[in-house]
Amino acid sequence: MLKQRILTAIVMLLLLIPSVLAADPLGFVVLTAVFIGAGGWEWGRLNGLSHRTSLASAVVCAGLCGVFWVTGLAARPLSSLWIVVGAAWVGLALWLLRAGASAWLPKPLALRWGGGLIFLCAAWLALVQARLAGIDFLLSLLLLVWVADVAAYFAGRAMGGRFFRQKLAPSISPGKTWEGVAGAVLGVLCMAFAWRALDLAGFTPGGSLYSRLASVGTIFLVISVVFLTAMGVVGDLLESLFKRAAGVKDSGVILPGHGGVLDRIDALLPVLPLALLLCTM
């Protein structure tokens, strides 16, 4: 399993890094649209749709991404969209994390399916806009989620249960702890201030997420980083809730050793539009 995870991660990086660093963003646009399409297929399956209908979900997601790019929508200011999508993510989290998986399935299938596709396409738009804002901005945003994930894992392994008897969300994801969340927040804050210092010293281009947030003020930077890290955890928990409601362990099998695409991008889905929102306030 570990060997599979490592090999899959290497292949993904070999695909992602050149597309991120290329002067022309088209390769990144196409690659991420394919990933979002795969996420759309998995979302259809999680909602009990047939293979054919789930495939149609993939085509719809990837097709909409293509339309957004060709029409120039992906390059336009979308502040209103980030407000609506961000508020929807927060509202969904407050409702479902309290009500649990049993409250999800009774909702109309069209609402569940359509809402998921909207969130996927909105995340793609935010991802492309982050790329257009600069490689430094994109990488600093992606690393926020990745560092949070790694820091939460090690903090949870080392200190899980030592300070808080209650798990984070035992009915949804029994392995997650409050100590892990604290480790994630601390890890991302350390990275944010280090990246900001490198920006100020001229070692980096200076257009990172953290410099943009810090331009409003240090307190705003801290609050924003904590909020985004928390919403990354929320994205992970919500995907676990959807899988529990569907009775599956992974969202798919497309990524050997990792599960499905949704298993890899769950934390990014709420963080991407919310980060764009915070940077346009």
Image (spheres, rainbow, N blue to C red):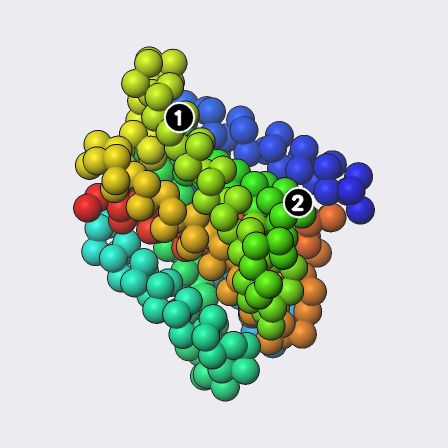
The reply to whether discs 1 and 2 touch (Cβ–Cβ < 8 Å) is no
For label 2, the residue is: 158
Relative vertical location of residue 59 with respect to residue 136 in this rendering, above or below: below
Residue 81, how many percent across, how many down?
26, 56
In the image, taking residue 10 as reference, residue 84 lies left or right, namely left
Residue 146's spot in the image, x, y percent? 53, 40
Mark 1 surroundings: few (<14), some (14-19) or many (≥20) residues within 10 A:
many
Q: Amino acid at mark 2?
A: Ala
Q: Position of residue 38 (x, y in %)?
A: 57, 55
Q: Position of residue 111 (x, y in %)?
A: 42, 77
Nearest the viewer among 241 and 193 is 193
Q: Compute the Cα span from label 1 to label 2.
A: 26 Å
Residue that appears at 49% across and 55% down: 233
Q: Which residue in the protein does label 1 denote?
A: 195
Q: Residue furthest bottom?
A: 106
Q: Is residue 242 above or below residue 85?
A: below
At mark 1, the secondary structure is helix
Q: Residue at x 63, y 48 (%)?
A: 159
Residue at left offset 63%, top offset 42%: 154
